[in-house]
Amino acid sequence: MTRRQAAGAGALVLALVLAALNLRPALTSVAPVMERIVADLDLSRATAGLVTTIPVLLMGLLAPLAPPLAARWTQERVLAGALALVAGALALRACSDHGALWLLLSAFGAGMGIAVAGPLMSSFIKQHFSRRVGGVIAAYSVSMTGGAALAVVLTLPLSEALGGSWSWALAAWSLPALLALLFWWWVVPTTGPAAKGTARAERLPLRSARAWLLTVFFAAQSGVFYALSTWLVARYEQVGVPPLQASAYASLFMGFGIAGALLVPLLAGRVSDRRWLLVLVTGTTTLAILLIAWRPEWLPWLVSATLGTSTAGTFALALALPVLETESPQQAASLTAMMLCAGYLLGGGVPSLVGIGRDISADYAWPFTFLAALSGLMVAISLLLPSPPPRRGVLGG
């Protein structure tokens, strides 16, 4: 590779990183101010949970549209449009203190943008970085996890700096999305390999048993992750932890997720059978959630950090598998679309279910026990997964 080619590849990686940083703040920035939203807008917690549930459901429902859109207009242009939609939806949250409708509209817009971007990120990595998949996937997953963590860490201080306005604090996350969009337009169409879409969209691998196991695994993983992102702060506040300290535990959860998102994909690329790695991280998640449900006073900083590492590692590995076990960008996009579609549709309602459980029981212990059961399902699926096929990919029969 020449120096000029290396510089071009580096710019593409940076564009990917900046885009990935903006694929989760729309969801995780809400958690630190959730109780303020409930109080100021006089919402039930089940309704407030829709702010997270709506984007996650759309991320599933609209995921199959991404490969055909890329085939028509190229994946690079469609990804740029998705970033624009996310930026606009986040900016709309400046109006959300005037009524829940604005907040829900922003959830719809952000969910649509993230839904289209998800499958095409896998295709983009497969197309432009086929010889360096492991490292680029690690950068991608770390960036996504890092964006989620920054949203949790900074939203409450932003709110205080903006005179206590949670709506403007949420809207502030449109600025990094806009910057990512501008950089994407500047770099991607003119740098590195020629921008091109898929000639035709691959069909979803609906007849593959392994693909279905991965999809159910992803559904449970997404439900657990987004429910924790939405309600972890509220759980600790309920047992008497001050809001800033509860947000600090959530920051540990997100921050240590960066380590998990980096290390687990790298480990996955070095082992021949990834099932036992999955069992380790999902088993750790199950135990940590049970501690939060029934022993929240037990070393919450350690439990939060451990939980962040294991859940983010599971998420990163779930995102990596379609790229690692397929042969082409089209196959990577189709398997990712299937996982995101069914996975998010099944898992997207979990944050609202936790909110409903809290409203009914007046406590988070049993709703969090339900999350532990979902995590236990992931352990079982990890054991049921067949050994990975030798370099043919899950779509290869």
Image (tube, helix red, strand yellow):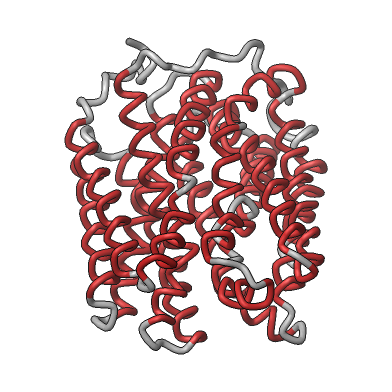
Q: Which residue sits at x=70%, y=32%?
A: 192
Left/right of residue 160 with respect to residue 135 in the rendered view: right
Left/right of residue 352 with respect to residue 180 in the rendered view: left
Q: Which residue sits at x=51%, y=22%?
A: 334
Judge by depth and name the residue closer to the eye, 260 or 253.
253
Dividing the picture into quadrants, the one containing residue 268 is: top left
Query: Residue 117, position in %: x, y?
Result: 64, 38
The quadrant the N terminus occupies is top right
Query: Residue 166, position in %: x, y?
Result: 70, 75
Q: Which residue sits at x=76%, y=62%?
A: 93
- Relative vertical location of residue 195 with respect to residue 343 in this rendering, above or below: above
Query: Residue 102, position in %: x, y?
Result: 77, 58
The quadrant the C terminus occupies is top left
- Relative vertical location of residue 106 with respect to residue 121 in this rendering, above or below: below
Judge by depth and name the residue closer to the eye, 130 or 30.
30
Q: Which residue sits at x=30%, y=23%?
A: 210
Judge by depth and name the residue closer to the eye, 346 or 316.
346
Query: Residue 132, position in %: x, y?
Result: 48, 35
Is residue 258 visible in the rendered structure shown here? Answer: no
